[in-house]
Image: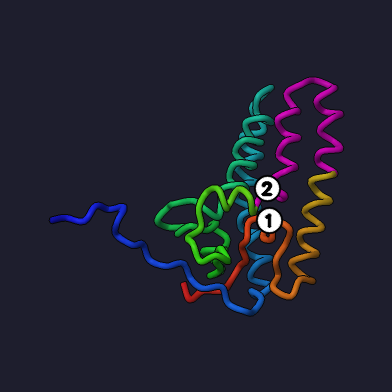
């Protein structure tokens, strides 16, 4: 008698290590992700009238879901983390999923809301400016937490119950 796929236990998530992931690796991983979405966002952003909002959806969507993407080559982490051999893990030992990724990355994706408003002439542009500024400030605070927190956990990690660890592959 075959066992239904839902009854087959999946591989356990890597146990969170006590140490802090290498800061240079984390920086380079974020830089890789930023270059990928930056180039895609700029290309799409050149589409007259609708490019900004579409770029916002692409950039914000990737940034929110990047650590829970169920793609073979990414293995439930962003492309930058995969290249740098880093992995976001849940502290409860469960596998990373889209919901946890969105909780973890929401503070970093706030600025993308400004792109949605860009479609509204003048007023949308004026409202976008403070959103971009607030998003930038939040990103700065998140970076400071990665540097100063004993485990390298930022607000998004604390909200989602995650941390970033180094892995062999």
Do the residues bearing badges 2 and 1 touch, measured as CB atoms within 8 Å?
Answer: yes
> Residue 120 lies in magenta, yes or no?
yes
**Relative to the observer, which residue lies in front, 149 or 86?**
149
Where is residue 48 drawn, in percent x and y? Answer: 67, 23
Q: Secondary structure at mark 2?
A: helix
Which of marks 1 and 2 precedes in the sequence? 2
Name the quadrant containing residue 20.
Answer: bottom right
Chief secondary structure of the magenta portion: helix
Colour mapping: rainbow
**Relative to the observer, which residue lies in front, 111 or 15?**
15
In the image, is residue 169 above or below residue 108? below
Q: Secondary structure at mark 1?
A: helix
Numbered label attached to residue 27: none
Residue at 44% from the left image edge and 52% from the top image edge: 70
Q: CA distance from mark 2 to mark 1?
A: 10 Å
User: From which residue to which does the magenta span run?
Assistant: 105-133
> Residue 82 lies in magenta, yes or no?
no
Where is residue 145 drawn, in percent x and y? Answer: 78, 65
Residue at 43% from the left image edge and 57% from the top image edge: 73
Q: Which residue is mark 1?
A: 159
Residue at 81% from the left image edge and 41% from the top image edge: 132
Say whether residue 27 is left or right of residue 94.
right
Q: Residues within 10 Å of mark 1 (few under 14, many from 20)?
A: some
Numbered label attached to residue 106: 2
């Amino acid at each position: 008698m075959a066992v239904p796929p839902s009854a087959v236990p999946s591989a356990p998530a890597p146990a969170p290590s006590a140490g802090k992931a290498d800061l240079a690796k984390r920086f380079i991983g974020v830089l890789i992700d930023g270059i990928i979405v930056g180039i895609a966002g700029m290309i799409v952003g050149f589409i007259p009238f609708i490019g900004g909002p579409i770029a916002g959806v692409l950039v914000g969507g990737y940034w929110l879901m990047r650590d829970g993407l169920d793609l073979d080559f990414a293995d439930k982490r962003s492309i930058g983390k995969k290249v740098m051999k880093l992995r976001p893990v849940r502290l409860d030992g469960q596998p990373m999923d889209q919901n946890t990724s969105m909780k973890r990355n929401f503070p970093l994706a706030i600025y993308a809301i400004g792109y949605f408003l860009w479609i509204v002439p003048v007023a949308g542009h004026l409202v976008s400016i403070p959103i971009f500024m607030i998003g930038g400030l939040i990103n700065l605070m998140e970076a400071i937490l990665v540097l100063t927190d004993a485990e390298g956990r930022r607000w998004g990690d604390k909200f989602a119950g995650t941390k970033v660890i180094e892995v062999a592959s």
